[in-house]
Image (tube, grey):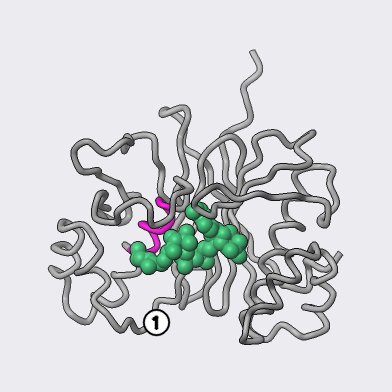
Amino acid sequence: MAHAAPPSVDVFTVRTDGVGGDVVAALSTQLTDEELARGARFVRAVDRDTFVIARALVRATLSAYGPTAPRDWRFETNTHGCPFVVAPQAGTPRLAFNLSHTTGLVALAVTRGRLVGVDVERVDRVLREDVAGRHFAPAEVRDLRALPAAAQPRAFFEYWTLKEAYIKARGMGLAIPLADFAFTLAPPAAPTIHFVDGFDDRPERWQFWQAWPTTAHRLSLAVTREDLDREVAVTLTESAAEALVA
Ligand SMILES: CC(C)(COP(=O)(O)OP(=O)(O)OC[C@H]1O[C@@H](n2cnc3c(N)ncnc32)[C@H](O)[C@@H]1OP(=O)(O)O)[C@@H](O)C(=O)NCCC(=O)NCCS
């Protein structure tokens, strides 16, 4: 009996620092007029360039999964702003993706037929408010505060990126209260999730995965496991922005 292809998620990252204006201009030709107009609204050049690189990464990468030119992918967003592929889907049914960008890096996760969310953050970012104390689950705050003080700022981003990856995989963003679910970290084991009573989800259907795409960037991924006995295989590929130019 033939086995279905093993469940997998492909994660792609592109560094955005130092990408030349000629490369950004070439990538812009892959964007739709609507995307170009949206990109033009960013005030800072660095944000405009990151936007263009991120959209080009999505379009060029999806074209490796189906017979569609980068410029021809069409997207819509759900009521929480989560983008998804609407056309063309011929040859690429159930294609799902999620995108994240932060200073210096964009990340894209692509899979088929499962929920997926990705988040990247720079771990040397200094926060002006006590985000953990105000928004994390009590168990997370307790575990974080139990660490040596010097380790806490970096460890904060373990929780932050995991929580973002989960709410993004659900496609709901901050409509899910961040204190309603908690991560337990016990490396080298994968992180596990727990929900408050009455929360409409099951921990066992989720797999979490983390990586350091650069020494300054933490990446977390959340993906659903349809077959609870099979691990979802994750691959991480770094590309240069230049390589996205058609
Ligand atoms: C919008 C949100 C989904 C992610 O925001 P973010 O972490 O600042 O940004 P990221 O770069 O990781 O993700 C943005 C991308 O996610 C996608 N996205 C937008 N809304 C989404 C949603 N509801 N679900 C999944 N993905 C979404 C989009 O592709 C977007 O990029 P684009 O606008 O260029 O297409 C939401 O979680 C948010 O506003 N977070 C605020 C951050 C925060 O306060 N976190 C608290 C600590 S846990």
Above or below, comparing residue 148 to residue 9 in the picture:
below
Q: Nearer the viewer, residue 129 or 119?
A: 129
Q: Quadrant of residue 155?
A: bottom left
Magenta stretch in the rendered image: 160-167
Q: Nearer the viewer, residue 188 or 51?
A: 51
**Three-letter code for the amino acid on which mark 1 is drawn:** Arg
Residue 120 at least partly seen: no
| Main secondary structure found in the magenta portion | helix
Q: Secondary structure at mark 1?
A: loop
Q: Is label 1's Cβ within 8 Å of ligand 1?
A: no
Q: What residue sits 38% from the left and 52% below the top?
A: 175
Q: What residue sits 26% from the left and 39% below the top?
A: 199
Q: Nearer the viewer, residue 234 or 163?
A: 163
- Give left or right: position of 222 versus 23: left
Name the residue at the top extreme. Answer: 1
Percent x, y for residue 239? 69, 67
Percent x, y for residue 231? 46, 37
Percent x, y for residue 237? 63, 60
Above or below, comparing residue 152 to residue 209 in the picture:
below
Percent x, y for residue 7? 56, 35
Residue 129 at least partly seen: yes
Q: What residue sits 55% from the left and 52% below the top?
A: 82
Above or below, comparing residue 9 to residue 2 in the picture:
below
- Give left or right: position of 92 versus 182: right
Q: Which residue is mark 1?
A: 125
232 inside magenta stretch: no
